[in-house]
Image (tube, rainbow, N blue to C red):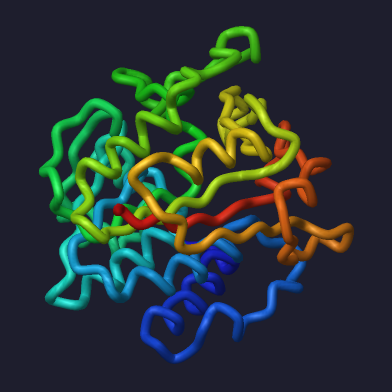
Amino acid sequence: MIGPNQQFILERAEQILAGEAGFADFGLGIPGHSERLVEVPWAAQYLGAAKNILDIGFSMSSLDWLGLLLIALKNPQTNLHAADIVRPERVASRYPEHWRAATLQVPVTIGDIRQIALPSDHFDLVTCISTIEHIGFDIASTDDPHSAFLRGKTPAEIAANRDPNVNRDVLAAFRRVLQPGGRAMISVPMGQGGPTLLKDSLGLYTRQWEYEHQSWQELSSQPGFTKIDERFFGLTGHDEWEEVSTPADLAQKSSELQPHASGCALLVLQKD
């Protein structure tokens, strides 16, 4: 079942996708929301024009984002393919019942985006919403009935860092599958930076990469792309999201052992 916050975000994003409103038309001063309040409506601006979409992290994506992808699919000219390390059939119970059949019909290539075989020069949009920060950390479990991921009961059981070439290799994969002029749309947590400890809903530990100035520059300046859009947002002391100017404005934020990020960055790159 989709929660009220996710439904609220989805309704905003649906209006943007339909051309009935713009991202700037909606205020962010609403306490009690994760970064999805920013990410999903922002992403809706770019989703409507795409015909061949590749979504990264589809199976475990936030339900507001998943719902928006399913709405976009109602356009008969839109095709959606996904890549994930988790099979959607394995986590089918997390999908609202009235979405389940449509969700399971989306073709999903299973594996790490850095390694799987996908058609070259094919997609006009790659979407990677709050996913790249998990690449290099998350590993799918094979026989755990309780968790789709291999995670630790203590922080010591999980990797303390990730491959330093993740940004380079993921963007190279995006460039390979995008058509000339195609776009990659990426959102990430931003703050103090580095590997950040998280505790999931099962009480198990994992880590994600929290971006800061240096790793953001690496991500947003990969060769073969032109930067089209770049924006930064952070939570205020009143638990409301606001736009800021640079990563430096988020340098004191941290998602360490928090339910969600307190800073985020949004990026659109176009393949040269």
In this picture, is 215 found above or below 165? below
Q: Quadrant of residue 224?
A: top left
Q: Residue furthest bottom?
A: 20
Where is the N terminus found, in terms of image quarters? bottom left
* Foreground residue among 85 and 205: 85
The answer to whether residue 16 of the structure is visible from this angle is: yes
Percent from the top left, x then y, of residue 51?
Answer: 19, 68
Residue 43 in picture, x, y percent from top left: 45, 65
Can residue 1 be seen at all in this image of the molecule? no
Instruction: Name the residue located 56 percent from the left edge and 74 percent from the top edge.
Output: 8
Tally of numbered tags: 0
Q: Residue furthest right?
A: 237
Q: Nearer the viewer, residue 220 or 94?
A: 220
Residue 99 percent across, percent down from the top left:
29, 63
Q: Residue at x 26, y 41 (%)?
A: 83
Image point 36% across, 29% down: which residue?
169
Instruction: Please determine whether, in this image, residue 70 is positioned above or below residue 122.
Output: below
Q: Residue furthest top?
A: 156
Q: Is residue 209 left or right of residue 172?
A: right
